[in-house]
Amino acid sequence: DAENPEALARIAIDEPTMNMLFTINNSPFFGKEGKLVTSRHIRDRLFKETEKNLALRVVTTESEDKFLVFGRGILHLSVLIETMRREGYELQVGQPQVIFKEGPNGERLEPIESLVVDVPAEVAGKVIELVTQKKGELKIMEPKGDLQHLEFEIPARGLIGLRSNVLTATAGRATMAHRFKSYEPWKGPISGRISGVLLAKESGVATPYSIDRMQDRGFFFIDPAESVYAGQVIGQHIRPDDLLINVCEAKKLTNMRASGSDDNVRIAPAVKFSLEECM
């Protein structure tokens, strides 16, 4: 009615289920990759993003250079981080945290997602084991051609890091999709990783000689001739505790060379993470 117009009902937008802390890069490698590095640049870019990215929320904190960014999941936040990185922004991010709510009776509620996995029948058991370790519940299991169709209900925090584990266990043959279902009572603690990390003892350039000597301690995330700073996480330890190692030590050369003392170093390729695996 032209005289008495009525507004249409608002479309409900899915609420954010995770948040991450965005802050300036204050590592020793500050300013080496991006051009836009100050908190003012990051603040303006995040608030500009909220104008068109409706499910995203940005909240300022007590600190001038730290911002809490709320999104719908790892993928939603990683697209923003990658876009900013390509635009020349340099920033640090914290670990993704799931947003909890309080129920009407004061109980703790967490976001639950519906997870659908299509996987070859011979590795379906491995997928079910991995998801149930993350407090997932199997709801539907049925054949779908050559594949098994699995449907789970899983806490949103259980999805963090699950995709890479499932793809490794199924040799990349699993197809995964998930969407937010509802807030439900907290499912209890989920076990984290059991391996410690390898830390750089001093700043410098990693040498092939040092990395070769330390290969039995775990997997490395860096290649020879890469710059490292003291305290940087450079690998995964084979044991649960963290280990401080020196990867910048060069080989001591002597005047006398014995035959066979200079064997060629054979270094396993460094483990390279995608952005989502890093998060």
Image (tube, helix red, strand yellow):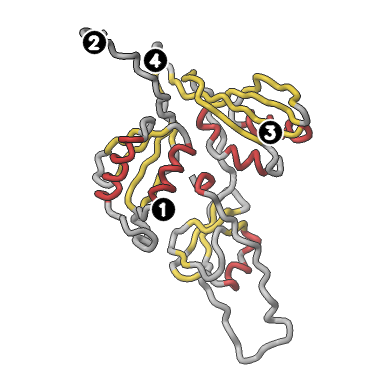
Residue indicated by mark 2: 2
Residue 188 visible in the picture: no
Q: Position of residue 131 (x, y in %)?
A: 63, 31
Secondary structure at numbered mark 3: helix
Residue shown at the point (41%, 34%) measured from the top left: 71
Sort mark 2 into few (<14), some (14-19) or many (20+) by Cα contacts within 10 Å. Answer: few
Q: Answer whether labels 3 and 2 touch (C-beta < 8 Å).
A: no
**Circle on res. 106:** 4
The x, y position of residue 181, in whole percent, is 51, 21
Give the Cα distance between marks 1 and 2: 48 Å
| Three-letter amino acid code at the position of disc 4 | Gly
Q: Nearer the viewer, residue 266 or 7?
A: 7
Cα–Cα span, label 3 and label 2: 58 Å
Residue kind at label 1, given as amino acid type: Arg
**Chain-order first, disc 4 or disc 2:** 2
Which residue corresponds to mark 3? Answer: 127
Q: Amino acid at mark 3?
A: Val
How much space separates mark 4 and mark 1, taking CA atoms?
44 Å
Q: Up-down: is 42 above or below 166? A: below
Which label sits in the foreground, 4 or 3?
3
Q: Visible in this render: residue 1?
A: yes
The residue identified by callout 1 is 86
Of badges 1 and 3, the one in the foreground is: 1
Q: Tell us which disc is closer to us: 4 or 2.
A: 2
Q: Nearer the viewer, mark 3 or mark 2?
A: 2
Q: Say what secondary structure mark 2 lies in.
A: loop
Q: Earlier in the sequence, mark 4 or mark 3?
A: 4
Say which label, 4 or 1, has the lower sequence index. Answer: 1
Type of amino acid at the residue the image marks with label 2: Ala
Q: Is residue 161 above or below residue 247?
A: above
**Residues under labels 4 and 3: Cα distance?**
34 Å
